[in-house]
Image: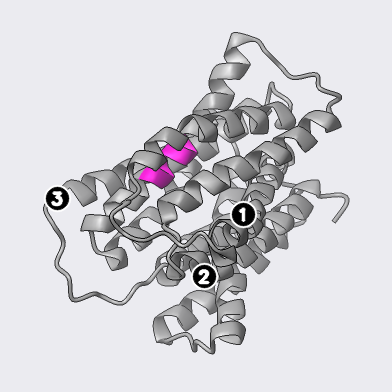
């Protein structure tokens, strides 16, 4: 584990995002809108960014290149999340989620072409299986409501591209920047989009301001922020072509297992196939004699 620090950080991201995914619906179902949840998440990025700055003794990189790269990571990731909210208002989740779940494909292509990343045959097999598993794990039952127009499809494509490029830039910037500086500017990018999230809130509906609203959301969203921080560290030491597919599917395993325990939700055949494929993929991507 210590010989492969990328794996340790990737596992922390997996656990954080997996637990986050299992509980994030609680505030939403209690009447706390997802867009308000975004605002809470952006705010929880601040204490994590402060911790990151303390680690580097407040020696933040402030040259224009570092600022632009860091902000790009933050704005692309957070912007994609806001576009996803809008896409799900008009588009079918059973199409949107599986499609967006394949964004690591573009990240892999960019990493191979521009970063010249390579890996072993076993890990390539694991990567392919992980990408297929992502589609199964993102499966949503078709709803009765028909899709409205085609804007949701355009927005889904935008999310796909933004998240793929975000992962690539995160790895690319790690070549010359401190991981802590990258995360700080990620936080800035997320906070800058808070006004956009605010105007997306439907105030005609009652908002739950009790403990199950903003307070519980903050406790859950901080896990998302911690996972984002350790992902930056993972990409500092490892290859994007392995890490991005891994953190794309492995948190879903924990989410489904926790959901099974907490909500007594039994995964159907599609999710079960995805779970098995994801486990196989993770084993293949981790078991490689060549260091990532």
Secondary structure of the residue carrying numbered label 3? loop
At 50% from the left edge and 87% from the top edge, which residue is drawn? 265
Q: Where is residue 7 in the image (x, y as percent from the top left)?
A: 75, 53
Q: Name the residue under label 1.
A: 218
Give yes or no for residue 254 being in the magenta stretch. Answer: no
Secondary structure of the residue carrying numbered label 1? helix
At 62% from the left edge and 72% from the top edge, which residue is drawn? 254
Which of marks 2 and 3 precedes in the sequence? Answer: 2
Spatial distance from mark 3 to mark 1, Cα to Cα? 34 Å
Which of marks 1 and 3 precedes in the sequence? Answer: 3
Spatial distance from mark 2 to mark 1, Cα to Cα? 12 Å
| Left or right: residue 65 compared with residue 105 | right
Q: Residue 150 carries which label?
A: 3
* Labelled pair 3, 2 in contact (Cβ < 8 Å): no
Give yes or no for residue 77 being in the magenta stretch. Answer: yes
Q: Name the residue under label 2.
A: 26
Q: Can residue 96 be seen in this view?
A: yes
Segment colored magenta: 76-82
């Amino acid at each position: 584990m210590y010989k492969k620090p990328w794996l340790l950080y990737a596992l922390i991201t997996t656990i954080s995002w997996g637990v986050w995914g299992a509980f994030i619906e609680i505030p939403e179902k209690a009447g706390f809108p997802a867009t308000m949840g975004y605002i809470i998440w952006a705010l929880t990025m601040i204490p994590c960014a402060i911790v990151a700055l303390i680690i580097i003794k407040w020696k933040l990189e402030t040259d224009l290149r570092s600022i632009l790269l860091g902000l790009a990571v933050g704005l692309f990731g957070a912007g994609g999340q806001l576009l996803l909210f809008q896409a799900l208002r008009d588009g079918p989740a059973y199409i949107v989620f599986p499609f967006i779940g394949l964004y690591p494909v573009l990240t892999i292509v960019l990493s191979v072409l521009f970063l010249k990343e390579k890996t072993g045959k076993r890990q390539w097999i694991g990567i392919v299986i992980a990408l297929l598993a992502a589609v199964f794990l993102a499966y949503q039952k078709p709803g009765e409501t028909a899709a409205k127009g085609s804007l949701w499809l355009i927005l889904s494509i935008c999310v796909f591209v933004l998240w793929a490029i975000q992962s690539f830039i995160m790895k690319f910037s790690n070549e010359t920047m401190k991981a802590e500086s990258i995360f700080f500017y990620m936080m800035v990018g997320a906070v800058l989009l808070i006004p956009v999230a605010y105007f997306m809130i439907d105030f005609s509906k009652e908002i739950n301001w009790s403990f199950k609203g903003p307070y519980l959301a903050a406790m859950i969203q901080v896990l998302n922020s911690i996972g984002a921080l350790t992902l930056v560290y993972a990409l500092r030491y490892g290859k994007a072509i392995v890490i991005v597919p891994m953190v794309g599917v492995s948190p879903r395993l924990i989410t489904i297992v926790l959901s099974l325990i907490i909500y007594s939700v039994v995964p159907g055949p599609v999710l079960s196939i995805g779970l098995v494929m994801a486990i196989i993929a993770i084993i293949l991507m981790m078991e490689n004699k060549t260091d990532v």
